[in-house]
Image: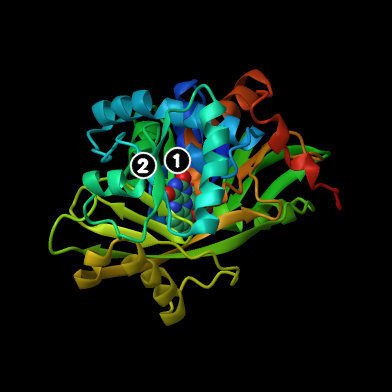
């Protein structure tokens, strides 16, 4: 990716070039702002490229109850079709967008009861299209499924995307709209005076700006701490792997209560993922990969013969109450945070970017993000 030379002033600096920072850069530069994105590594090099790329809003309402998180992520999922065609056309990056839906399955009494309960809730939500299917009918469409699977729910609302390419397309789209992107350039402190943001110090010099967006993923607690504010975002490691099956085994993403098996356009199957609170340790481990592999024979027995191609991990940004922090940081005018999207940052990126633009450009708090204000955590210590 071609990066313009860094300038020493901007309307807004974004710390973090993951999917959240790049989506925000795309929206904000589209609104005419002079945007600089800083990343200490490459674009999308952290959680965003490690992701499974699922755009699955039902995950935000596992128990079938409508919540503010579901409303936020449903609104986000509805943006994808238009956003993807706009990005593919303007950037030339193909993002493997697949709107063909998903299935959730149950393999024992307990799982069947849980899934039935969720299904009742999903069925009552008018925006969702879900269907209850017995095990034999599922296997007619997906012959590779285990005979142990008793039933499932098909959703035609869910989508998937190549998360790394999507992040790069957002970054390239932002560049095309005049944003500057600086990789390998960590922000090292935030300059502020009399309760007003002044700029960011980087490894390559100072940048003065009117506004700052903290979108530093699992590291977002660090820039908040520079301001004397504690937003409790921590890393939650996820390990995944990819398999190369000998024959076609599955046509759409499959979720169970123990993990997911995900067919990809390149013919591989991705399987995952663990959720581990182990700090900033990005290793893939024997125990983690063993846990992930356990689900394969239980769901799609034929995959036991597949070749292992790769294993990887990423650090999801996890807020201690499980929901993201999106909104103005109190105590210092001109600073916004958008982080803590945990398992759903790819899904949540378009609506996060739009609502951040509304905040920064129009000073409007969209009702969709009101429940996610960082004020819920905050005591200002400095
Ligand atoms: C295994 C796995 C599977 C997942 N599957 C899905 C899925 O299917 N669907 C979904 O929606 N989500 C999924 N997620 C979650 C999703 O990947 C994350 O929620 C999302 O990528 C978070 O994006 P982000 O931009 O906040 O963070 P990141 O992508 O981590 O980006 C943050 C960036 O900030 C940079 N940074 C940090 N500190 C500084 C600093 N001081 N200066 C400059 N740069 C800095 C980092 O280098 C990094 O590039 C998955 C995650 C994992 C790990």
Q: Which residue is drawn at 53% across and 33% down?
A: 122
Residue 353 visible in this rendered orientation of the protein: no
Looking at the image, which residue sits at the far left? 247
Mark 1 and mark 2: Cα distance apart in space: 8 Å
Image coordinates of residue 227 in percent, x first then y, are: 76, 50
Relative to 98, residue 304 above or below:
below
Is residue 352 rendered to the left or right of residue 140? right
Image coordinates of residue 287 in percent, x first then y, are: 45, 80
Q: Which residue is drawn at 43% across and 38% down?
A: 180
Relative to 128, residue 249 above or below:
below
Residue 206 visible in this rendered orientation of the protein: yes
Q: Name the residue under label 2.
A: 102
Given contact means CB atoms under 8 Å apart, are the residues at marks 1 and 2 in contact? yes
Image coordinates of residue 355 in percent, x first then y, are: 59, 27
In the image, the residue with mark 2 has its CB under 8 Å from the nearest atom of ligand 1: no
Is residue 10 rendered to the left or right of residue 231? left
N-terminal of the pair, mark 1 or mark 2, is 1
Indicate the quadrant where residue 124 lies.
Answer: top right
Q: What secondary structure is found at the residue carrying circle 1?
A: loop
Indicate the quadrant where residue 199 lies.
Answer: top right
Q: Name the residue under label 1.
A: 56
Tell me the number on the disc at residue 236. Answer: none
Relative to 285, residue 42 above or below:
above
């Amino acid at each position: 990716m071609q990066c313009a030379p860094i300038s020493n002033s901007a309307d807004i600096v974004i710390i973090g070039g993951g999917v959240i920072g790049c989506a925000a850069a795309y929206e904000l530069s589209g609104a005419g702002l002079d945007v600089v994105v800083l990343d200490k590594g490459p674009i999308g090099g952290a959680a965003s490229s490690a992701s499974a790329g699922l755009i699955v809003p039902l995950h935000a309402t596992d128990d079938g109850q409508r919540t503010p998180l579901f409303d936020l992520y449903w609104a986000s999922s509805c943006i994808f079709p238009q956003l993807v065609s706009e990005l593919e056309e303007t950037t030339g990056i193909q993002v493997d967008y697949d709107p063909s839906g998903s299935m959730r399955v149950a393999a024992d009494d307990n799982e069947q009861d849980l899934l039935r309960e969720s299904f009742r809730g999903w069925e009552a939500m008018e925006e969702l299209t879900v269907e209850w299917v017995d095990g034999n009918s599922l296997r007619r469409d997906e012959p590779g499924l285990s005979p142990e699977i008793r039933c499932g729910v098909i959703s035609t609302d869910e989508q998937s995307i190549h998360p790394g390419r999507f992040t790069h397309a957002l970054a390239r789209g932002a560049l095309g709209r005049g944003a500057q992107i600086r990789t390998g350039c960590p922000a090292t402190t935030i300059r502020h005076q009399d309760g007003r943001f002044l700029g960011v110090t980087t490894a390559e010099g100072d940048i003065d700006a009117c506004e700052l967006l903290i979108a530093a993923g699992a590291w977002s607690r660090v820039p908040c701490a520079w301001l004397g504010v504690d937003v409790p975002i921590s890393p939650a490691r996820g390990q995944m792997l990819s398999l190369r099956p000998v024959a076609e085994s599955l046509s759409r993403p499959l979720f169970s209560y123990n993990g997911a098996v995900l067919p990809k356009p390149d013919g591989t199957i991705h399987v995952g993922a663990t959720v581990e609170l182990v700090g900033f340790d990005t290793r893939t481990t024997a125990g983690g990969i063993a846990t992930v592999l356990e689900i394969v024979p239980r769901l799609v027995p034929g995959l036991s013969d597949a070749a292992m191609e790769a294993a990887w991990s990423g650090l999801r940004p996890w807020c201690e109450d499980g929901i993201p922090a999106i909104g103005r940081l109190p105590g210092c005018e001109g600073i916004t945070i958008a982080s803590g999207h945990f398992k759903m940052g790819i899904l949540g990126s378009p609506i996060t970017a739009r609502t951040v633009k509304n905040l920064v450009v129009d000073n409007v708090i969209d009702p969709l993000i009101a429940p996610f204000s960082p004020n819920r955590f905050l005591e200002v210590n400095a």
